[in-house]
Image (cartoon, rainbow, N blue to C red):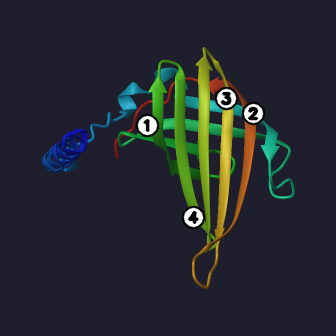
Amino acid sequence: MIVIIICYMRILLSLLILLMFPILANAEVIKAEISVNDVPKALLGTWRVDSKLDNTNAYDRFRPQGVDFWKLSLIDDKLTLENPNTKVKAQVSLNTVEGNLIVFTKKTNYDNNKVLTDTVNIRLNGEKFSGINTLTLESYSLIDNHLMKTETAQYLLKGEKLSGDTIPLNK
């Protein structure tokens, strides 16, 4: 008798799962969009950024320390990072904006077989910030495009604002 009850329970459970599957399969995932309007205006402007290598698997690839200049601005409702010295300019993707915590990512393809992912995690504190910059460099085969090597580095960042808010521009 117990065996029969267990068999009926399994059948009922299987039917319930089959009936629920179409509902679960059509369920939408709701993802909150991060808007450039969420970016604290204090982030915009020109910054002097000191970086110090904290961790890497490729000491010959990544320099131990550096000084850069970042100009962060809003152009056509996109967060843009520019290095005034190198003239490199790129749009960055906002990952997180929670109060004075900002996380953004920039991905760059180069040499036909390399992808550099640059993720910056900073906490604003008035005219300064501190944070971490994580770099991942993936090298792919030119023959069959398989991943050949991944090199990573983590830098500790300290930023000091040099000039005020950058006025949003619309082209």
Crowding near pointer 4: few (<14 within 10 Å), some, many (20+)?
few
Q: In the current view of this chain or complex, which residue is farthest to the front?
A: 1
Crowding near pointer 1: few (<14 within 10 Å), some, many (20+)?
many
Marks 3/4: CA–CA distance: 24 Å
Marks 3/1: CA–CA distance: 21 Å
Helix, strand or loop under label 1? strand
15 lies left or right of 39: left
3 vs 1, front mark: 3
Q: Which residue position is annotated with label 1?
A: 74
Any mark on residue 109, and which? 4
Relative to the observer, which residue lies in front, 136 or 124?
A: 136
Q: Which residue position is annotated with label 3?
A: 131
Write the residue at 67% across / 58% down: 137
Q: In the current view of this chain or complex, which residue is farthest to the bottom?
A: 143
Identity of the amino acid at label 4? Asn
Q: Position of residue 104 (x, y in %)?
A: 52, 39
Q: Position of residue 147 (x, y in %)?
A: 62, 70
Q: Which residue position is annotated with label 2?
A: 156
Helix, strand or loop under label 2? strand
Crowding near pointer 3: few (<14 within 10 Å), some, many (20+)?
some
Helix, strand or loop under label 4? strand
Marks 4/2: CA–CA distance: 24 Å
Answer with mark 3 or mark 4, whichever residue precedes in sequence: 4
Q: Are marks 3 and 2 in contact (CB under 8 Å)?
A: yes
